[in-house]
Image (cartoon, rainbow, N blue to C red):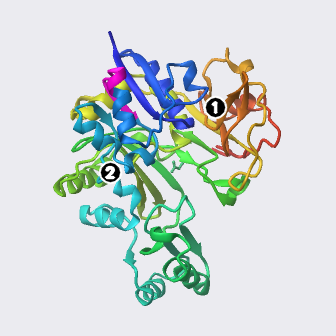
Amino acid sequence: MGRQLLVLGGGGREHALTSALARSPSVSVVHTAPGNPGTARLGPTHAIDATDPDAVTALARELAVDLVVVGPEAPLVAGVVDALERVGIAAFGPTAAAARIEGSKAFAKEIMEAAGAPTGGSVATSDRSEALAALERFGAPYVVKADGLAAGKGVRICTELAEASDAVDDALLRGVFGSAGSRIVVEEYLAGPERSVFGVCDGTEVVLLEPAQDYKRALDGDEGLNTGGMGAYTPVPGFSLGDVDHLADLVFRPVLEELADRGTPYRGLLYAGLVDTEAGPKLLEFNARFGDPETQAILPRIDSDLAELLWAAATGSVAEQQVAWRDDAAVTVVLASGGYPGSYPTGVPIHGIDELAGLDDVEVFHAGTRLDDGQLVTAGGRVLAVTALGGEVADARRRAYAAADRITFEGLHRRSDIASGV
Ligand code: GLY
């Protein structure tokens, strides 16, 4: 009998996790909570609030699962992993204290600096004049960030000093971000492409996954508003696992040691957002979870038992783990609701997904969907993520767009330049 797993969350990342875990030889069943119509095809779903520690521990006990895998940050911040640890159920994800590495930008910078990991200069402050002095010192482009989580809206990058000092006043004087902006971080701007590197961590050791390139802006050519991510590809030429394995010693292990020394060992997925500057990769931020939609591109390339790897991380023995990778590249295209990341309609019928069911190496991950009387309809901003594998990034890109072309819903918006020119 294989392991029984419970994945928390209900987006595209969780569908990709559920799919990779379900094909892991060590697994017998993957439950999801709340899950979505895509995960429901792979295992049972449970309509609980995944951010409620009592509800999660009760469900995990009732199902007698061996391992809970936490997808989004909200259950982490709510202390779900702490609650599972208290009742002796293994969990893949950091405790609330360790997840502060995502929840507080000032804390993340403090850890990076204490660990000696490469990053840009920064000043964390609640004092307006100190913030303005830091802006003058770092120069343009100016970077002002709310310390706490501000629904992706807490970062301002400004070319003019007046605009940057207005951003400071928005946070500190006008309280635009509430308590998330009562402290801000003024940072040195890092120039270069942004890359996502994921480390599977067990508290002291790390196994790096293949880096991916995310596309955060809504429109082609990196125009428009910031989104959760409109597409991704992997491997990234010049920034593949073979090129960046030194980051395990340069970034991940020192950060793990620093967190362990502070009494908050980090187990789970540590997501390093890095800028590939002329002086080498520098840390922009950490997230305490898998990235979305990078996960939808990375996991289909894994050719070994993902569940074994996450189990090892949760129970403290990741060093013995080897990940096998398919040689193929993967490209993921996000299909979003018209209007996203602003307001958008829901309940719009989706057509064409079933036609893709038989295609080799094409997966359609559900992100914001639901079933209405048996009809699949939209239920969120990012609706689906279509991933295809192919020999080279260009092949995977052609296959991903050909598959995406077959899915329709009114108002569908997608970028047409994911992985273009790679
Ligand atoms: N794709 C960016 C993120 O997951 O934060």
Q: Position of residue 209 (x, y in %)?
A: 40, 38
Q: Nearer the viewer, residue 325 or 293?
A: 293
Mark 2 is on which residue type?
Ala
Position of the C terminus, as image quadrant, is top right
Is 6 displayed left or right of 234 in the figure?
Answer: left
Q: Residue at x 45, y 23 (%)?
A: 31
Callout 2: 10 Å neighbours few (<14), some, many (20+)? many
Mark 2 touches mark 1? (CB < 8 Å): no
Q: Residue 144: horizontal and vertical position, in percent?
A: 50, 74
Mark 2 residue element? loop
Q: Is residue 163 above or below residue 1?
A: below
Q: In the rendered image of this protein, does residue 49 appear above or below residue 225?
A: above
Which mark is on residue 96? 2
The residue singled out by tag 1 in the image is 396
Q: Position of residue 290 (x, y in %)?
A: 45, 42
Range of magenta residues = 61-69
Q: Secondary structure at mark 1?
A: helix
How many discs mark residues in the rendered view?
2
Depth check, front residue: 343 or 117? 343
Q: Residues within 10 Å of mark 1 (few under 14, many from 20)?
A: many
Residue 62 inside the magenta-drawn segment: yes
Q: CA distance from mark 2 to mark 1?
A: 38 Å
Percent position of residue 224, x then y: 71, 60
Q: Please tell me the numbered disc located at residue 104.
A: none
In the rendered image, residue 210 lying in the magenta stretch gets the answer no
Mark sitting earlier along the chain (2/1): 2
Q: Residue at x 42, y 64 (%)?
A: 279
Q: Disc 2 or disc 1, which is closer to the eye?
A: 2
| Residue 121, placed above or below residue 231 | below
Horizontal side of 320 relative to 393 (left or right) equals left
The amino acid pointed to by label 1 is Ala
Residue 63 versus residue 353: which sits nearer the camera?
A: 63
